[in-house]
Amino acid sequence: MEEIRMMVLSENSSSRQGLAAIFAQEDTFEMVGTYAIEEGLRRAISIQPDVVLLDIEDRITPQQLERLDQLNEACPCSMILSIVTEEQNDIISALLAHGIDGCIPRGMMRGSLVKTIELVCRCGVLCLPGSIKSKVALNGAAPSAAGNIKKFVLDGNEVLTKREYEVLQLMAENLSNRQISETLFIGEATVKTHVSNILRKLKQNNRAQAVVYSYQAGLISALILFHGSLAALLKSFF
């Protein structure tokens, strides 16, 4: 299995060194650079890493968010993840709005952090702190009742098919494409097509944004998998 090429970005040099030391010892990862956030976002465009890991300690600037937009456009194959404190709801919301692929709660044990990022990179599993659920509930529309499987009218009169809605529910449960295919007894390539259709119809850039938007719009009743149940997922997967 190919190594995952990782870049670590943080304004704190000690944090950069610590994270780099953790992943440099893992055969799964290859460190391709550690930088301050804005410089790293700029350099990532030429390096094209598999994953960019941001460590956001207290704030993120408008200039950094602009760089994040540029990175998403220039590096469509790079996963962008951020380590955040659960109480940083405004930062988490801003990161999701600018296309980040997941937010990892600060304070994870070393082994769990490594396996979480590997799982996100290999399978596209969504990771969000549990606190974002209440943030979304406060700022979004009231969710619909669970289990109400039907077509939903979306912006631009786009609709989800019954199968796409089923896939969306499983995305919210944090299942990978492979797990969704096994659950619904369909091919993994078919799942990828459904996921692409869901993102297009919801007008979202990635799975994280699609799940948050769907909760706000009432398409799903809860964001089911957060870091509290991540250990169980990792145990079953690995």
Image: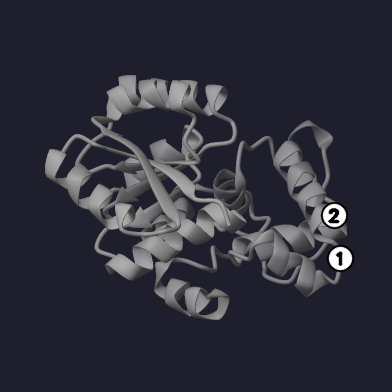
Category of crowding for the residue at label 1, using alpha-carbon neighbours closer than 10 angstroms: few (below 14), some (14–19), many (at least 20):
few
Residue at 29% across, 22% down? 39
Mark 1 touching mark 2, by CB under 8 A? yes
Q: Secondary structure at mark 2?
A: helix
Q: CA distance from mark 1 to mark 2?
A: 7 Å
Q: Secondary structure at mark 1?
A: loop
Going by the numbered disc 1, the residue's amino acid type is Ile
Image quadrant assignment for residue 12: top left
Q: Evaluate whether residue 185 shows in this view.
A: yes
Residue at 74% across, 49% down? 195
Q: Position of residue 99 (x, y in %)?
A: 51, 35
The answer to whether 202 appears left or right of 4 in the picture is: right
Q: Evaluate whether residue 86 shows in this view.
A: no
Category of crowding for the residue at label 2, using alpha-carbon neighbours closer than 10 angstroms: few (below 14), some (14–19), many (at least 20):
few
Q: Which label was assigned to residue 190? A: 2
Residue at 78% across, 58% down? 165
Q: Which label was assigned to residue 186? A: 1
Q: Position of residue 86 (x, y in %)?
A: 30, 57
Observer-nearest of 69 and 90: 69
5 is higher (above) or lower (below) than 177: above
Q: Position of residue 204 (x, y in %)?
A: 63, 37
Observer-nearest of 27 and 237: 27
Image quadrant assignment for residue 32: top left
Observer-nearest of 90 and 116: 116
Going by the numbered disc 2, the residue's amino acid type is Thr
